[in-house]
Amino acid sequence: MAFLLASCSTVQKQIRSGWSTKEISPGVQLSNRYFPSLFHAPENINMISVDLRDTTLKISIAYNDSLLVPVSEFGKAGNAIAGVNGNFFNTHIGGSVCFLKVDGRVVNRTHDELNGTLYLPWLDTAALAISENRVAIIIKPAGTRWAQNHFDFPTIISAGPLLVWNSRIVRQRAHKWNETRYSRTGIGLTKDHHLLLVAIDGNAKESAGVTIPEFAALFKALKSVSALNFDGGGSTTMWVSSEPENGIVNHPTDNKKYDHFGERKIANAVLIMRR
């Protein structure tokens, strides 16, 4: 696997400072920062940090394999603390187009028979994996498909591309999807056992969004040892139960406005919950 060099130190320092942070539940923090110019563009970024050493917290995947549901509804139904949108899905009939296993049951297999408007192969190469006492980012073995017996994790939600691995930025293939600035959702794991959930606003004059290499540089600057991209664009949503505006803290874009009311219906969500 090829890697790029880490972002320059000046960009890392810029990203690491100036955040507005508050505790939304013991062990869970919500942070926001608006950058007038990050990667030479305005960027509004929301981040949730979860202390995985807190054994009263758990990470869960909420899903519906036929209906599309907003993140806020997934969160409220699960009595969750917070959540973000999950992986890539079939916008016509619902359900993930990438591999999804929850509590030992395969909910969705990889739909690599679909065309490039619904499925791209490098968006299914790594996964967030969850067990009773461990949260990890894992990589699909080369030349294989995800299977029920892959790895010792009852819950696996695949996505991609992989952004950071072993504290190094992953080199990305040349493709318009990677090189265009969009709203982005992703997750990262830090050396001190925190899970980072990040949502970047895009498609607006107030916030341009980022490319995949820029997203990787962000996670590297936030000291992630591994990081993974989830679905983005109009799907990017961050919800916090204690916040106003129906709990939506970012600016989803489905209503073509820079507000908190353009939430898209999706197939699954990553939720932070209390045991």
Image (spheres, grey):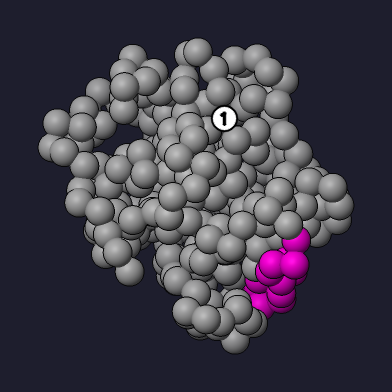
* Figure disc tally: 1
User: Residue at the spot x=59%, y=15% of the render?
Assistant: 258
Q: Residues within 10 Å of mark 1 (few under 14, many from 20)?
A: few
User: Residue at the spot x=71%, y=71% of the render?
Assistant: 109
Dot 1 falls on a residue whose secondary structure is loop
Where is mark 1, residue-wise? 242
| Magenta-drawn stretch contains 90 | no
| Magenta-drawn stretch contains 109 | yes
Image location of residue 221, percent across then percent down: 25, 42
User: Residue at the spot x=64%, y=82% of the render?
Assistant: 148
Left or right: 110 as drawn, with respect to 145: right
Image location of residue 42, percent across then percent down: 39, 18
User: Residue at the spot x=53%, y=61% of the render?
Assistant: 122
Nearer to us in this view, 70 or 108 = 108
Image location of residue 5, percent across then percent down: 20, 51
Left or right: 168 as drawn, with respect to 234: left
Nearer to us in this view, 275 or 8 = 8
In the figure, 128 relative to 272: above or below?
A: below
Nearer to us in this view, 65 or 205 = 205
Image location of residue 262, percent across then percent down: 69, 24
In the figure, 95 relative to 25: above or below?
A: below
Over which residues does the magenta segment extend? 100-114
In the figure, 26 relative to 144: above or below?
A: above
Image quadrant for the C terminus?
bottom right
Q: Is residue 4 visible?
A: yes
Outermost residue toward the left in this view: 9
Image quadrant for the N terminus?
bottom left
Q: Name the amino acid type tagged 1.
A: Ser
In the figure, 33 relative to 127: above or below?
A: above
